[in-house]
Image: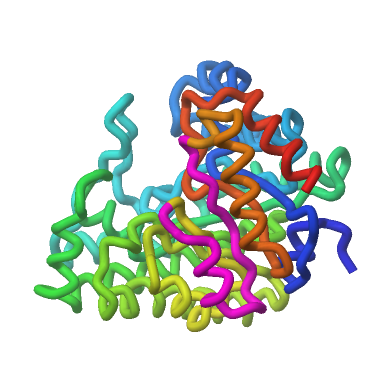
Amino acid sequence: MTSKPILRVLSGESVWPPPVWLMRQAGRHLPEYRATRAEAGSFMQLCFNPELAAEVTLQPVRRYGVDAAILFSDILIVPWAMGQGLTFAEGEGPRLPPITDRAGVDRLDVAGAAARAAPIMETVRRVRADLDANHPNTTLIGFAGSPWTVACYMVEGKGGGEFKHARRMIHTDPALFGALVAKLEEATLAYLLAQADAGAEVLMLFDSWAGQLAPNAFRKWVIEPTKRLRAAIAAARPGLPVIGFPRLAGPMLAEYAAATGVQAVGMDTAMNPAWAATQVPGHVALQGNLDPEVLIAGGAALQGEVESILAAMRGRPFIFNLGHGVEIPTPPEHVVRLIEILRAA
């Protein structure tokens, strides 16, 4: 029997007050992060410096006492590790050479990806050692991007917009897109299992652009790859929990939760928690879904929204989180207040 609240929730227990962590909790709203980022020199250099990446992963645990540390990295590490170019332009986000044909897919090197991602695993080992020594009730979450979302970036060559090239490709050349997703699944599975071997206790799949798809395409390119990954993880590492986050899935969230086999699903900002509480199977934990803008506002707005979410979630397995990531202008004292409200629930 574990004493870690998040692992208890992911085993199906309703823990109250609910455990809490925040997406992008280690990020630019923290002055200590900005100092470490400046020391690293660039975002990619920070991701691949195990000492500094471990430091920023642990910063919100030390400051806020959240119930989980999530590996500081990026969902585009997997395509980078397979050999697709990746740069981050300040203020512009990621840039990749777009994959538009079979030759581009064939050039992706799945076999060599593990060696290129080795520094990430050293970060995981360092964080786990620190948590075990200093924060024994805090869970370590590893993660990757889900195949649909990562493929969107790989085909489009950048983020933002509506990913029309990827959405068109699934209809005009589904074989090509399927070949890309197959390689992504293989590399993502190896990447996630390596994180587990290094010390991650939970794995999370971020499908940030799931909401771009119509229901039938959602089933084929979001649910089915997630289901295959979850089954492969369960076969290789029995008992290792997985959280899925199909952002902006809307009513497809319930089908995703029932079909994929994940232990928890993340609710985005637009999701009605009361609806999710009745439609998502009771054995699947829910995670979410405070609006990051409310966390910036603080005060009565924060109090009221937190209380509303808690009222909808009481009595079922639940992890408090945001509906998306912490925004840069977020005052750290508002996060402190959020934790206080939750601990007193």
- Residue 148, located in which quarter of the rendered image? bottom left
Q: Residue at x 44, y 71 (%)?
A: 253
Tell me if 291 is positioned left or right of 219 in this view: right
Above or below, comparing residue 11 to residue 318 in the picture:
below
- Residue 52, located in which quarter of the rendered image? top right
- Residue 51, located in which quarter of the rendered image? top right
From where the camera sits, is residue 19 visible?
Answer: yes
- x and y percent of residue 233 in the render? 59, 74
Q: Residue at x 84, y 50 (%)?
A: 137
Q: Does the magenta stretch include residue 285?
A: yes
Please state which of residues 166 and 21 is positioned toward the viewer in this rendering: 21
Tell me if 283 is positioned left or right of 261 in this view: right
From where the camera sits, is residue 232 visible?
Answer: no
Please state which of residues 287 and 221 is positioned toward the viewer in this rendering: 287
- x and y percent of residue 177 in the render? 22, 70
Q: Residue at x 52, y 82 (%)?
A: 258
Q: What stretch is highlighted in magenta?
A: 270-293
Where the N terminus falls, by quadrant?
A: bottom right
